Image (cartoon, rainbow, N blue to C red):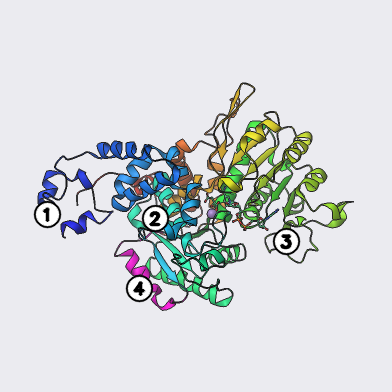
């Protein structure tokens, strides 16, 4: 191999850490400054440079330049500063890089760009992108429902890259075994279609059979090329996400993060909140605000939990309410999605059913004990709504989960203040602790990033044939017991600073469940060991 091929390959490059012997052996003599650095020296120097950047976007661009050059160094740094880097590398800053992807473009970051206008090249593209590597994990998006910022076409590829970075930082998935993918099926965003810099296909989104055939061709081709792959779907639009999951979930090892990952983390957060308040799951009255992909996915997960806790289906259903654009969802509404239908209510249940067209009216009529926001409507949890909720329940559980920051339904600080410290809060994006009346309230982050890495690691390590509901439920339950609920101001979820530690906990629980159910393809005698053995460490290896 030529010196430049090594230096330009982020999986091989060690930069100034190449030793004198390596420099001699691989033709690198004189190709680098003479002083040999350790990875610790490199990380220290890079971190100082990172700190000199003016804002989070600049910091991310700098970190991505290291990612492009040297994956080991990037993950070394990331592992040293997990909680600090998460909002820079991932949400919310990633929203800015997605919106500006074409303008900021410098590197394709080993992603595979699959175009619906050229389906015949799909296999070639995936083969080229893998470049002989064994791919065990794909994150794929079609860019239609990026976070809460909507349709960004090909620019959505950054969410696939970003989610994968978190898999490695949190769970130690080997970065050379992952592949980010975008399905470019067009975009309906006018500003992109008219932007001369836009790098994607310039036409409206293709829908219907041609779209689903393209997705199917992708699933089949990826399965054929990478038979041991875990396929993670991210940020598909509301009309497709659940359809795709339902089509493939019993056949291949697949996962929809917005539906399932968000369901797990929100259930874990609610269990954490009940642990603090002493409340019972089966006593809760649940209201979903913004009953789309995530909202319906969470609702379904909490509903399953109530069934597991002993309620009949009818008893459990009676505890759920969904509010969307129309207001409270009723079963006579022709626009309900298939996921909303089972939770829609009868008008006859209310004297003023026709007036329940706003969140405020619904909260007044129903007195929920849990309110979860996935609506993309900033500020929708107003002071009067929150106070109304708090007037009827001792410790209201309020989770504004919409991302990024500019779309959150409320801030943690306001929720704590408006409820005099009573609200049990988790947010989608990281939130600083809130000081109120002498108590420091730690705010849990109910973001699927806290569970999807462990879930994937556990599923892959256990060689499971599918990822099923039982494994998902075990993942949610495994997050309990990390936070001390008796401490004043305790968070409902474990802190991101421990992300790498509890990702192993989640992975072990998931792998154990797969083995207990006999879903493993290979014989496994020690679950802890297979999980631990999969962990990739950011250390330089001999070339
Ligand atoms: N914290 C997390 O881990 C997490 C995970 C997934 C999604 N999210 C966030 O949840 C939000 C929704 O994501 P999604 O994938 O479900 O999108 P989606 O488009 O599938 O769902 C959004 C829903 O909100 C509804 N809505 C829009 N305007 C509304 C209004 N004025 N009042 C009530 N409802 C309204 C829409 O009709 C839709 O049903 C995004 O901001 C996303 O970032 C957070
Ligand atoms: O990406 C995130 O931060 C969480 C979630 O998947 C989302 O779509 O908002
Ligand atoms: Mn998402």
The tag earlier along the polypeptide, 1 or 3, is 1
Identify residue for label 4: 124
Which residue sits at x=51%, y=57%? 467
Identify residue for label 1: 27
Q: Give the quadrant of ligand 1.
A: bottom right
Q: Is residue 192 left or right of residue 341?
A: left
Mark 1 → mark 4, Cα distance in angstroms: 32 Å
Mark 1 → mark 2, Cα distance in angstroms: 44 Å
Identify residue for label 2: 523
Mark 1 → mark 3, Cα distance in angstroms: 65 Å
x, y percent for residue 236: 55, 62
> Cβ(mark 4) to ligand 3 < 8 Å?
no
- What are the residue bounds of the magenta stretch? 117-137
The tag earlier along the polypeptide, 1 or 2, is 1
Which residue sits at x=37%, y=68%? 126
The tag earlier along the polypeptide, 1 or 4, is 1
Which residue sits at x=67%, y=40%? 398
Q: Residues within 10 Å of mark 3 (few under 14, many from 20)?
A: some
């Amino acid at each position: 191999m030529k010196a430049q091929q090594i230096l330009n390959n982020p999986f091989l490059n060690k930069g100034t850490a190449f030793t004198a012997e390596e420099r001699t052996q691989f033709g690198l003599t004189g190709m680098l400054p003479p002083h040999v650095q350790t990875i610790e020296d490199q990380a220290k120097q890079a971190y100082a440079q990172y700190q000199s950047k003016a804002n989070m976007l600049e910091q991310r661009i700098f970190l991505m330049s290291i990612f492009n050059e040297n994956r080991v160094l990037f993950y070394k740094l990331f592992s040293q500063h997990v909680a600090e880097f998460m909002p820079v590398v991932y949400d919310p800053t990633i929203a800015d890089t997605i919106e500006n992807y074409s303008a900021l473009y410098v590197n394709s970051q080993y992603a595979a760009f699959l175009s619906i206008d050229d389906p015949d090249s799909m296999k070639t593209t995936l083969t080229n992108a893998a470049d002989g590597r064994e791919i065990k994990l794909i994150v794929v998006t079609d860019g239609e429902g990026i976070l809460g910022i909507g349709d960004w076409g090909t620019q959505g590829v950054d969410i696939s890259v970003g989610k994968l970075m978190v898999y490695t930082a949190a769970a130690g998935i080997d970065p050379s075994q992952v592949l980010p993918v975008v399905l470019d099926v067009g975009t309906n965003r006018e500003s992109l279609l008219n932007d001369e810099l836009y790098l994607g296909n310039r036409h409206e989104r293709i829908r219907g059979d041609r779209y689903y055939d393209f997705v199917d061709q992708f699933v089949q081709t990826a399965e054929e090329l990478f038979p041991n792959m875990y396929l993670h779907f991210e940020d598909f639009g509301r009309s497709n996400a659940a359809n795709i999951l339902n089509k493939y979930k019993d056949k291949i090892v697949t996962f929809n993060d917005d539906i399932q990952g968000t369901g797990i983390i929100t259930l874990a957060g609610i269990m954490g909140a009940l642990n603090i308040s002493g409340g019972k799951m089966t006593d809760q009255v649940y209201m979903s605000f913004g009953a789309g992909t995530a909202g319906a996915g969470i609702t379904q997960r909490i509903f399953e939990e109530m069934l597991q806790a002993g309620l009949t289906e009818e008893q459990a259903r009676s505890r759920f309410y969904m509010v969307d654009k129309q207001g409270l969802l009723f079963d006579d509404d022709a626009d309900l999605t298939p996921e909303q239908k089972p939770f829609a209510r009868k008008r006859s249940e209310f004297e003023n059913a026709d007036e329940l067209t706003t969140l405020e009216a619904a909260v007044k009529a129903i007195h929920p004990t849990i309110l979860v926001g996935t609506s993309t409507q900033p500020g929708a949890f107003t002071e009067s709504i929150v106070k109304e909720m708090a007037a009827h329940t001792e410790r209201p559980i309020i989770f504004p989960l919409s991302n990024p920051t500019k779309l959150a339904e409320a801030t943690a600080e306001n929720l704590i203040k408006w409820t005099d410290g009573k609200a049990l809060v988790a947010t989608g994006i990281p939130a600083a602790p809130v000081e109120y009346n002498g108590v420091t309230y730690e705010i849990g982050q109910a973001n699927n990033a806290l569970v999807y890495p462990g879930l994937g690691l556990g599923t892959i390590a256990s060689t499971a044939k599918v990822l099923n509901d039982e494994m998902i439920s075990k993942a949610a339950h495994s997050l309990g017991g990390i936070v001390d609920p008796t401490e004043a101001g305790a968070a409902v979820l474990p802190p991101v600073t421990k992300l790498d530690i509890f990702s192993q906990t989640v992975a072990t629980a998931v792998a154990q469940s797969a083995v207990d159910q006999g879903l493993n393809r290979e014989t496994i005698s020690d679950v802890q060991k297979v999980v631990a053995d999969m962990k990739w460490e950011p250390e330089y290896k001999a070339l």
